[in-house]
Amino acid sequence: MAGDVAGRVTSGSIALVICLSMTPTIRADTLNGSLINAYQNNPQLNSQRAVTRESDEQVPQALSGYKPTISATLSTSQSYTSQVSKLTSVSPVVVATPSGPQRIVLPQQPCVSAPCYPRTDFESQPSTAGLTISQTLFNGFQTANRVRQAESNTSAARESLRVAEQTVLLNAATAYMDLLRDGALLDLQRRNVEVLQEQLRQTRDRFNVGEVTRTDIAQTEAQLAQGRATVLAAEAQYVRSRANYRQFIGVEAGALQPAAPVDRLTPRNLIGAIEIARARHPSVGVAMFGIDAAVLQVKITEGSLYPQAHLIGGVQQNWESQAISTQLQQFNAFVQAQVTIPIFNAGPAGASDTFSSIRAAKETVGQKRMDLETARDQIQAAVVTAWGQLEAAKAQILATQAGVAAAEIALDGVREEARVGQRTTLDILLQQQTLVNARTALVTAQHDRVVASYTVLSAVGELNLPKLGINIPLYDPMVHYQQVRDAWIGVRIPDGR
C-alpha cells in the first residue's frame, strides 16, 4: 500500500514537470511575443539602428561636393593715425573741412618759418562687407565616387543592422527557452523532494513495525538532503535565467507557454543551407559592400591627380578704407575661373604621398576581398555546427524519451520487489534518482531542440520576424535615409531633436 502511494506521487509529480510548460494560462507569455518585445525594446538593437542612421548622413555629406560654398564677411574697426612732417619752406596753410565721419586735426601753431615740423592727426572707422561664392566644376570625379562610397557604407550599415537583429532575436529565443527549461527543472526538483519526503515517512513507518533498519532511514534522509540542496541550486539558476530574460527581452517574464521548433523554415538539407548562407547572409553583404567602398576609395585617391576646376565670385563694399584718403566708399565685384593641374606632389612633412596612398588603397581592396572569403567560410562553419547540433538534439529527444519510459518501468519494478523483500530502500532511492535524471535530460533535450532550430535559421541568415510569420510594423532604415539624403540645411534630426 505504501509503495503504491509513493509510486502514484512520483509518477504524477514528474509527469507534471514535463507538462508544466504545456499548460496554457490566461496571462502567459509566448515566444513570439517575447521576440516582438526584444525587437522593439532591446537597447543593443536600438543602438545599432542609431549607428545606421548616423551612417545615412555620409551621403548628404558626400553630396555637398556638388553644392556651392557661400560665405559672408563683415568687419569694422577704429583707426587713428598721427603724422609728423618736415617742411623746409613755408607755404600758405590750407585748413581742410572735415567731410563725413573722417576727421583731420591740424596743428595748433601753423608754420611761419622753415624748417618746421607740423603734426597732423587722422581718425577714421573703416568697414567692409563682402560675399564670396565658390563652386567646384571638376575635381577628378571625386565627388561622384565619394557619393557612391557613402551609399556603399550605408548599405553595409543596413546589413550590419540585420546581423544585430538576428543576434538579438536568437538571444531572446535562447533566454526564453532557458527560463522555460529552468522553471521546469526547478519544479521537477521540488517534486522530487516531495517524493523523498513521502519515502522518508513510509520508511519510518516500516521501521516502527520492524520491516527496515535505521540504515534505511539514514539513507533516505541523506537523499532528501541532497534533493533539497539541488532545489537551492535550481532556484539560483532560475533567478539567473529570469535576469537574462529581462536583459534580452526588456520586460519581466510572466508565465511562459511552450515553444515549438522552426524546422519548417530551415532548408531541407545541409548543402542547401550552406548555399543560401554563403549567398544571402548579412555578414556576407557587409563584406561585399566593404569591397565596393574600398574600390571607390582607390578612385577617389586617383582623382587628386586630375585637374581641378573651380568658379569663384564675390562682391565687396568698403567704407573709409584709408584714413588719409577722401574716398568714402568703394564697391568691388569679381568672377574668377581657376584650373589647377597637379604635376608632382610628394606630400609635405606629415602628409600622405598621393601615389603611396593609391597603392595603399589598392592593397586594402585585396584585403577586403580576403575578408569576404573569410566571412563566407565562417558562416559555412557556423551552419555546419548548428545543423549538427540540431540533428543531435533530435536524436537526444528520442533517446531521453526512451530513457524516461525505461526508468519509470524500472522504478515500479524495484518498488514491487522491495515490497516482497528482494530490494532495499537504497535500491528505491537510486532508481528514483535515475528517473529524475532521465526527466532532467528530457527537459534539457526539448530545450536544445528548439534553440538549435533557431540557431540554424540564424546561421543561414534568415532569422527575422517576417520569416517567423510575426506581422508587426518593422523598422525600415530607408525611411530615415530618404529624409536626410537631399537635405541642404537644418540641424534637427527627423525625430525633432
Image (cartoon, rainbow, N blue to C red):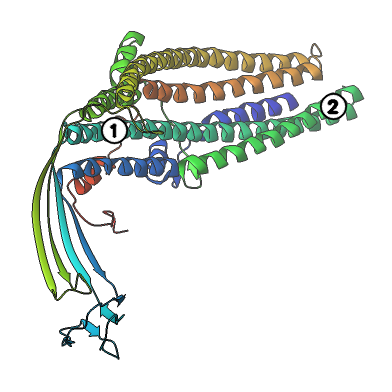
Residue 192 point in image, percent of width and height: 68, 30
- The front one of 247 and 13 is 247
The answer to which quarter of the image holds residue 123 is: bottom left
Q: Is residue 210 visible?
A: no
Pick whichever of labels 1 and 2 is earlier in the sequence: 1
Q: Is residue 8 left or right of residue 442?
A: right
Mark 1: few/some/many CA within 10 Å (<14, 14-19, 20+): many
**Three-letter code for the amino acid on which mark 2 is drawn:** Arg
For the point 26% across and 32% down, which residue is it? 155
For the point 16% across and 83% down, which residue is it? 100
Q: Is residue 369 visible?
A: yes
- The front one of 213 and 87 is 87
Q: Which residue lies under the disc numbered 2? A: 206
For the point 37% across and 30% down, which residue is it? 163
Marker disc for residue 221: none
Q: Which residue lies under the disc numbered 1? A: 153
